[in-house]
Amino acid sequence: MTDSLSGDPLAGANVRLEDTSTGAPTDPDGSYEIDGIAPGRYAVVVSYLSYRSKRRTVTLEAGERRRLDVALAPQNMEIEEITVQDERAEAEGRNVGVAELSAREIKNLPTVLEPDVFRALQLLPGVKSSSDFSSGLYIRGGSPDQTLILLDETPVYSPSHFFGFFSLFNPDAIGNVRLYKGGFPAEYGGRIGSVVDLQNKSGSRNETSGKLSLGLLASRASAQGPHPLGGSWMVAVRRSTLEPLLGYLNDLDVDGIPNSFYFYDVNVKTDVQLTERDRLAASAYSGRDALQLAFGAQQAQIDLTYGNSIGSVRWSHRFSEKLFSDVWLTGSDYRSRPSLEIAGTPIESSVDVQDLGVQGELAYLPNDRHTLEAGFQAGQLASSYVTEFNVTDGAADNQNQSNNPLEGESWYADVFAQETYRPTSLWKLRGGLRASFFGDGNYARLAPRLSVEHRPRSNVRLQAAYGRYYQYPKLSTRGSFSGFDYWLLAAEGVPPAWGNQFVAAVKTTPFEGYKADVEAYYRTMNGLFELSPFVSDPSGQPYPQVLHFGGGYATGLEVFLEKTSGRVGGFVSYALGRTRWRFDDIKGGDYFPPKHDRTHDLTAVLRYDFAPSWRATVVFNYATGQAYTRPSAQYKLLNDPIQSNPRDVLVAPFNNARLPPYHRMDAGVRKRGSFFGVADYELQMQVINAYNRSNVWFYNFNFTDDNRVERETIPQIPVPLPNLALTLSF
């Protein structure tokens, strides 16, 4: 199944035999297989969201196998429906906790700013960021490092630009996104929370085309087309264009605005059909951020550069109509160079992560009731963190001091096997087992997975899933700026994190054009480790001396209500959640809420097509304020034998306070049309933070000479932020 305009494969399209319960979804390559069909004449119906369905008639003889390729045409861009969903109602084979978005859906989602993968996902219940400048996704009570993020099967270790204001993924380059919020199957491993699996576009096999988007915040350009070797290519570039806006805000002396900032990224992908049974694809990504920011009463200065380099090569082979294989070579490199200067003392750090791997998968479809899958993954993972700073000893000149790096390096290997069994059209069961090995520490673990789905009625699905998960790399956060975060690896004396997940869901389409999903979850988290807040620099120190060890749990209920058709549409997503962690050395071993705990999280989206080519969108979000530790007082230690009258700080119980509730409304208008018959255009006019809500990013506390505590508020988006963007497609 392909897009008739671009030739891109359509993952998740629904292929079914009309007036029967027989059918199958397409895989990420757009391929499908339907077995066990009796001889006869059939109408084959192919459907996919935002595309016109097609109906083909085929006649099958006994023992005959027939290949049927179908290219679907996109619906009229002016009347197409907008759908954000946890599961496509008309598609078969969706698992519990899954959300899947195509490139067209990502761009048509009613969000503001740039069309963005992460901002689209954050509209779903249970998926949030910690702030407007967050470095990652917080999914069902998990920290960002508990989410496995893959780009063409390659792990991504820093998935954001500008601390989450933009995601790493250019919407013009991404072809398909699949999110597992929980209960993910055995083919995925290495994280205890969730999975975001992204695939780059392969490019058009039909014609060469291009796109140019100019905006106040960022601009993009992309091109795609066929090549003579029987395949396709795609190139997409993006760069921020924030400099004029930042200069204007700095002239107004607005707090919390960077002195300078830019980012860029480049995506490239090509694929070649080597033979009728073999296909080769290669993709690469490169991106960089650079930031300067002054904040606080002491005018602390942050200089930060960081970036990712990601690449993969995939070989797909079809042994027969029932047996398929894929092999990948992957590489991921993340480097960050943060520098912090406080009171004239510079501190420079370096953070590096390298992951080189190979993996393979084999799928066997003996009949329409059974699907057997097996695979392996192996590679080398290395991480390091080192800090260098200047010190002054009396009359001596400043001296550079460098701590020994905090580093780890290990090989890893995983194998898995799973089966999907459909005893009838009303039931689907999937069971699997994943074995993982991590060389540093000689860890070996088994992780069972199980899911079940029952359809008591044609428009109702009852789903449940269980899984055990293990995680060997762990992200250690260093405050509000993600560029200072670094990855620690499980090692001897530092066991991997692990947890269990239980998920249950009811998904229904009660009326034409409406849907309602309710999902509940409970998950445990063990083997968590956090950097001690009293350690200023962990470089060169043994893990047990700088880490707190503990665990926790998260539980919640998610509701998603959507109207998908008509000129007025939208959705409401609500999540009720509770996350608690416990560490022996924090708060006396009692449970406490981590900063990303959210009791309530509500998102409402309204879109109105008030004319054939015009659309207005409003997005509102409300969330419980994040937890933080509040200092209570400062006091002096009199007659101290080591230091004359040193000062100390008295703090309240850990994370016992909350920031004010977060709420924000964004609004935008979009106009589409033809540019003198030469190109199609889309004009977007948007206002972020429309009613000027000054949400708190964090508090900076200062202490006076008379031991009083003065609180300074560091805001998130401090003013209404306009954006104007023009996109030309040719």
Image (cartoon, helix red, strand yellow):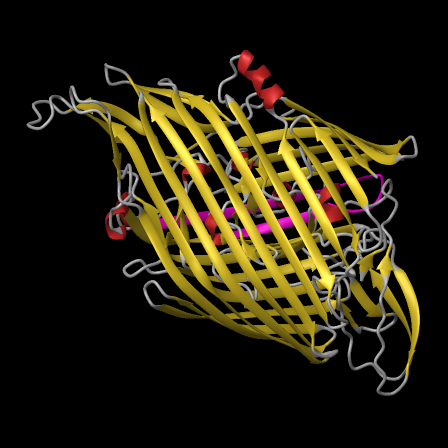
Q: How far across and down, in percent of the image, does residue 610 sit?
A: 85, 32
Q: How far across and down, in percent of the image, does residue 518 sit?
A: 63, 54
Q: Is residue 247 left or right of residue 645?
A: right
Q: Which residues are magenta?
A: 556-583
In this view of the protein, can residue 344 be seen by the observer? yes
Q: Is residue 407 left or right of residue 559?
A: left
In the current view of this chain or complex, which residue is farthest to the top?
252
Q: How many marks?
A: 0
In the current view of this chain or complex, which residue is farthest to the bottom?
62
Q: How far across and down, in percent of the image, does residue 255 sit?
A: 49, 18
Q: How far across and down, in percent of the image, does residue 604 sit?
A: 67, 38
Task: Check the picture and name the quadrant holding the C terminus.
Answer: top right
* Foreground pick, 182 / 8: 8
Q: Which quadrant would residue 375 be assigned to in this image?
A: bottom right
Dominant secondary structure, magenta: strand
Q: Is residue 652 left or right of residue 69?
A: left
Indicate yes or no whether the magenta region holds residue 577.
Answer: yes
Indicate yes or no whether the magenta region holds residue 434.
Answer: no
Task: Check the picture and name the quadrant holding the N terminus.
Answer: bottom right
In this view of the protein, can residue 629 be seen by the observer? no
Residue depicted at 36% across the width and 37% down the height: 349
Q: Is residue 632 left or right of residue 437?
A: left
Residue depicted at 62% across the width and 21% down the height: 720
Asked if 223 appears above or below 189 in the picture, the reply is: above
Residue depicted at 29% across the width and 49% down the height: 548
* Foreground pick, 292 / 546: 292
